[in-house]
Image (cartoon, helix red, strand yellow):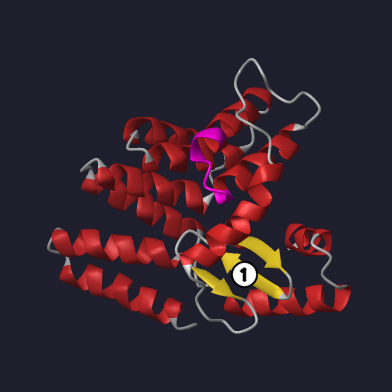
Amino acid sequence: MLRAAARLLDADVSVNRVTRTLSLLREQLPAGRPLSAVRILVTGQRVILRDRLASWELDSGQGALDFDVQAMSAQVAPQLPMKTTANSEPQEQTSNGLYETALDLELAGRGDEARDTYEAVLRRDPKLTGARINLGRLLHAAGRLGEAEALYRAAFEQDPGNALAAFNLGVALEDQGKADAAADAYRTALEIDEGYADAHYNLSRLLEAQGDVRGALRHLSRFRRLMHGG
């Protein structure tokens, strides 16, 4: 929440509006989405939120078109550092600063550079679980499932209370056809955070495919209640 406030203040948003924005953000954050998964874009009087599933305008709650978000991201992209490699890491940045740069590169659609920057972060601080998870997600999206799985497992070993690491591990396992192991990973995510809506949904699908209709319906029902604020 403090990071969100800082981003808004950096964009010259008034303190009063920052307070109102954070209040609306709490109300509109989709069930099962951590605040850390939401990116905030500001242009003029518009505040647009973006998570991995959707983009929407904060004040109206209406969905934002992809080209709107891309245009706003493009305003940030030219200010970001160029490609980071093992031999050319910006030494003036801390590992946390590099992590923020990687997030911004990812938001700007510069996935290869974001991946390189996450790798640079982990070389400096292997304990930054968020960087490990995000790097895994980029490799996952690139079809490098085995590498993504290894990163998610390492992240979970570092932080056994991290529901996102367990959930992403489940997705990587499922995408490799390892349904039983994926179901176990989703169950682990739900043991950590019973309100993790996506884990309920994915586990419901797997249980249905395995013939466990009762279990599938139970998790699907919980997913629907969470999505409707129940």
Q: Nearer the viewer, residue 67 or 155?
A: 67
Q: Nearer the viewer, residue 157 or 13?
A: 13
| Residue drawn where x is 54% and y is 49% of the image | 162
The residue at the far right in this view is 15
Regarding residue 106, the answer to whether it shows in the image is: yes
Q: Which residue is the site of mark 1? A: 48
Across and down, in percent, residue 170 comes to 35, 48
Residue 113 figure quarter: top right
Q: Look at the picture and state if 160 lies above or below 15.
A: above
Q: Look at the picture and state if 16 lies above or below 152.
A: below
| Residue drawn where x is 77% and y is 23% of the image | 91
| Residue drawn where x is 48% and y is 70% of the image | 65
Q: Amino acid at mark 1?
A: Ile
Q: Secondary structure at mark 1?
A: strand
Q: Nearer the viewer, residue 74 or 149?
A: 74
Across and down, in percent, residue 221 comes to 32, 78
The residue at the far left in this view is 211
| Residue drawn where x is 62% and y is 27% of the image | 84
> Which image quarter is the N terminus in?
bottom right
Q: Is residue 111 magenta?
A: yes
* Span shown in magenta: 107-113
Across and down, in percent, residue 80 comes to 68, 40
Regarding residue 194, the answer to whether it shows in the image is: no
Q: Look at the picture and state if 144 lies above or below 197.
A: above
**Structural crowding at the residue carrying mark 1, measured as other residues with C-alpha within 10 Å and reported as few (<14), some (14–19) or many (≥20):** many
Number of marks: 1
In the visual, does 41 lie left or right of 119? right
Q: Nearer the viewer, residue 204 or 71?
A: 71
